[in-house]
Image (spheres, grey):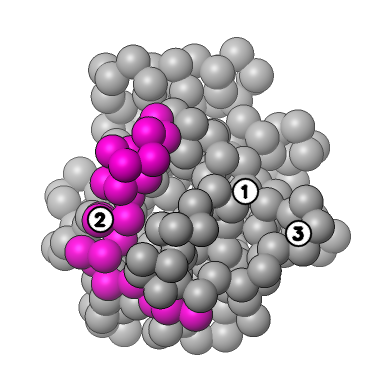
């Protein structure tokens, strides 16, 4: 199985939109749904607290998080969304509205480390995706500080936030997810995971696109939306 570098990940995304005519909201729904299913597979039987903190950034990775939060409600979790840099783009306004319509609290105030450790059984990291380049912007420094220190298990969507897409963690204090859900295909940073479960979601890659980039993706079982890689 191939691990994509940053430019390959960008190219694959562009081809899905331009060559294969997928829409952003279409792929985001499929990706977020697969993340919710993978989260439930990984933690559904073991997590004691069903309250989940979903940290969403302003881009498509954050959109995946908003979708995942909505589906987690239907799996009997209690997601709370931290969404500090909200956008006026219609897609994201609608995703936030859908969350709030399902009773999900969406907040812009950064939770404290103490509150996260006390209240939540799981954290979903959907802050930055494969277009991220260090360093972390100042607006996200507080939540990154919380994620770097929390004792609550972290599930990162596609890229652990703050990591270099190819080189992985930038220092010893970088966040250490207990689970990574790669989307479309794993990125090179996933090689640097230590003692973390690794899933692949986003079961929508056309066979010709897989062949073009020599992805050699694993076989999904039955009608599963995810596959565990380790």
Q: Which-is-in-front pick, marks 2 and 3? A: 2
Residue 34's disc number: 1
Residue 19: in magenta span? yes
Percent x, y of residue 44: 79, 55
Disc 2 or 3, which lies upstream in sequence? 2
Q: Residue at x 30, y 61 (%)?
A: 9
Q: Which element is circle 2 on?
A: helix
Residue 134's disc number: none
Percent x, y of residue 156: 48, 60
The correct choice, above or below, for 226 with respect to 195 in the image is above
Left or right: residue 54 compared with residue 101: left
Q: Residue at x 27, y 24 (%)?
A: 87
Indicate the quadrant where residue 62 lies. top left
Q: Which-is-in-front pick, marks 1 and 2? A: 2
Residue 41's disc number: 3
List the residue tagged with mark 2.
Answer: 10
């Amino acid at each position: 199985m191939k691990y994509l570098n940053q430019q390959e990940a960008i190219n694959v995304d562009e081809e899905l939109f331009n060559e294969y005519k997928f829409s952003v909201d279409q792929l985001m729904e499929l990706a977020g749904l697969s993340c919710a299913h993978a989260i439930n597979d990984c933690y559904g039987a073991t997590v004691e607290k069903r309250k989940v903190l979903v940290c969403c950034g302003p881009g498509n990775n954050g959109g995946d998080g908003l979708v995942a939060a909505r589906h987690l409600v239907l799996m009997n979790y209690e997601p709370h969304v931290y969404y500090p840099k909200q956008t006026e783009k219609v897609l994201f306004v609608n995703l936030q509205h859908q969350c709030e319509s399902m009773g999900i609290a969406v907040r812009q105030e950064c939770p404290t480390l103490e509150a996260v450790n006390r209240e939540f059984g799981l954290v979903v990291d959907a802050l930055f995706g494969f277009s991220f380049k260090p360093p972390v912007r100042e607006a996200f420094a507080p939540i990154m500080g919380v994620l770097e220190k929390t004792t609550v298990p972290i599930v990162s969507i596609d890229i652990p936030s703050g990591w270099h897409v190819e080189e992985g963690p930038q220092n010893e204090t970088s966040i250490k997810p207990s689970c990574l859900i790669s989307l479309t295909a794993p990125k090179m940073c996933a090689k640097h995971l230590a003692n973390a479960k690794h899933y692949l979601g986003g079961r929508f890659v056309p066979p010709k696109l897989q062949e073009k980039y020599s992805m050699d993706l694993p076989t999904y079982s039955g009608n599963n939306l995810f596959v565990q890689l380790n």
